[in-house]
Amino acid sequence: MASQPAGKEAVARATAAVAAGIKACEAYDRPDLAKRLERAATSLAEPSVPVVVVGEFKQGKSSLVNALVGANICPVDDDVATAIPTSVSYGEQQRAELIFEGEPPAREPIDLGDVRRWVVESDPVTAAVEPEPQDTNRGRPVGAEVTLPRKLLSGGLTLVDTPGVGGLGSAHAAASLAAASMADALVFVTDASQELTASERDFLIKARNLCSAVVCVLTKTDFYPRWRTIAELNAKHLRDLGDPPIIPVSSTLRSQAAATGDTALNAESGFPELVTFLTAQVGGAAAQRRAATAAGEVATACTQIEAQFEAERSALDNPKQAKRVVAELTEAKERASALKSAAAKWSQTLTDGVTDLTSDIEHDLRGRIRTVLQEASDAIDESDPADTWHEMEAWLEARVAHELIENYTMLRDRAIELSERVGEHFREASGGVLDAIAVRNPEPMLAGAKIDHKIELERMKVGKQAMVALKSAYGGAIMFVMLGTLTGISLGPIALGIGLVMGRKGLRDEKKRQRNARQSQAKNAVRRYCDEVSFVAQKDSRDTIRRIQRELRDYYTGLADEFNTSNAAALQRANEAAARTKSERTKRLSDIDAEMARLKQLREHAMAVTS
């Protein structure tokens, strides 16, 4: 994997190549190609390397982030947990902002010291006495962003402290997986108290499929003397995951070392190895990718400009072949113009692919929700919602969240395949337009869909049970006494016994009726919740697919415009060449050779950026 110095050097070379490419495009009157290179320059100057920190509750994630950046940003108290993700990135000044749900998301600056009270999860007792902070105009925040002037972050690293996954079956775990799919690296945090649990290992398997760069950080080594044994056990668990590195650290020792300037204590904390991994391997690899992409853009621009001169040179070098060159360029111009029409093969492929993708994604979601409904119905039939409804709510939210993640992952993978198919019609294009299609975080969506159960969860109290039994017993006794009176037979105490039996049966029937009613209400609540989530998810997936379609359409339409412009310029130069005199041709050939030599040198310089 690339090192940080190699990555920085590659970015510096790519930046110089892009700058030279922009000047060349301006000199050759190709503002369209210059605009593309300006976008590449922006990506080099403003890098973003998201690193998501995930793990179970109380494993030391927040302490780890604080120790890495040398600031108490994330809450680390034992009695609270992180409730919303907090990202920490580079900035010349210390700054903090809250992010509220919306399109586009609303932002509100806050004091750095107030971050804690916004991002923690209050316990029920505290929440009853002191409600969670909330902006009355914008509702609850969905994230917080902090910028700090730290060398570690200067290369574009953004550390994201996420809520604890709470086991694989939690909604937080689904949200963490969504974040992992958009990250350059995943830092999985587990403490040294025990080896990896089954749920942690299952989470890592899923995360590995979404993010290739994973490191397992073993925290609290200063508190657990047997951490080396735990590290060895964890290494065995991770062998079938490609042996991701395991880095033991102590946030406490790191903080003490920072306070005292003790380099030996800092080395003992294990953080230097983690910092090296993040900056050299993660940051270096990301820098190499950005540099390679930018260099490819420069090479593509050079190739298109060279095509203009090659056509003119052919016409100048052999005037007898000028007509043939012009005819070939005219035919090529027609092909380039056809690329911009709706009937073009790439456009048809895109349209048909988007239609198929929309249908398949919605069908997949309906199938997943149907499975959830059936599982919920079976569970409700086997239990009494009065006893199990609270567990059912948590299970339902987590189950639906994971199905949404699977559905969006399918959308992302299929969209990338579609991009590649469309790109086959543009062999000249350098790379794909969508390298990573974002998987939307389902948590904000779930937050808007509440489980409105409307279930009478309380069982009959003793007093009510007595009244039901007495009513049934009284009715039964009266019935048999009247029957005895009509037949002339005195039943006496027997009627009382019969009444007691009838009372017991009446109570049992009433309990059964109420349980059946609760089960029916619970099934309706599950169905309403799943319908609401499906409604929101289908709208969101359709919007995502439309956005992908527009991005692909605009990218390849712009590419077709570039090819058309290049071909038109080449055709114009070839026509002009045919009308030149012999002396003019000789001079122009010399000028063209010089221009092509400069373009070739620039292209080779760009291609050597990452070599």
Image: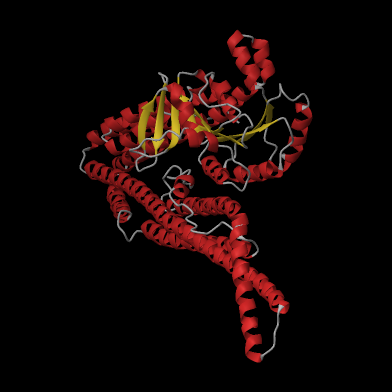
Is residue 513 something one can see in this rendering? yes
> Quadrant where the C terminus lies?
top right
Q: Is residue 100 left or right of residue 232?
A: left
User: Residue 132, image x and y in percent?
Assistant: 45, 35
Residue 92 position, x and y percent, is: 41, 18
Q: Nearer the viewer, residue 160 or 374?
A: 374
* Left or right: residue 511 compared with residue 574: right
Question: By what rule are the colours in the image chosen?
Answer: secondary structure
Residue 199, image x, y percentages: 67, 44
From the viewer's side, name the closer residue of 260 and 351: 260
**Frontmost residue, 505 versus 554:** 505
| Position of residue 75 measured from the top left corner of the image (x, y, whole percent) | 54, 27
Q: Is residue 390 above or below residue 27?
A: below
Q: 598 left or right of 407?
A: left
The answer to which image quadrant residue 54 occupies is top right
Instruction: Locate residue 194: give its quadrant.
Output: top right
Residue pictured at 37% horizontal, 35% vertical: 135
460 relative to 43, above or below: below
In the rendered image, the vertical position of residue 368 relative to residue 325, given as above or below: below
* Residue 121 visible, this angle: no
How many numbered marks does the figure carry? 0
Pick the front one: 209 or 448: 448
Does residue 434 sit above or below 3 in this rendering? below
Looking at the rendered image, the quarter that the N terminus falls into is top right
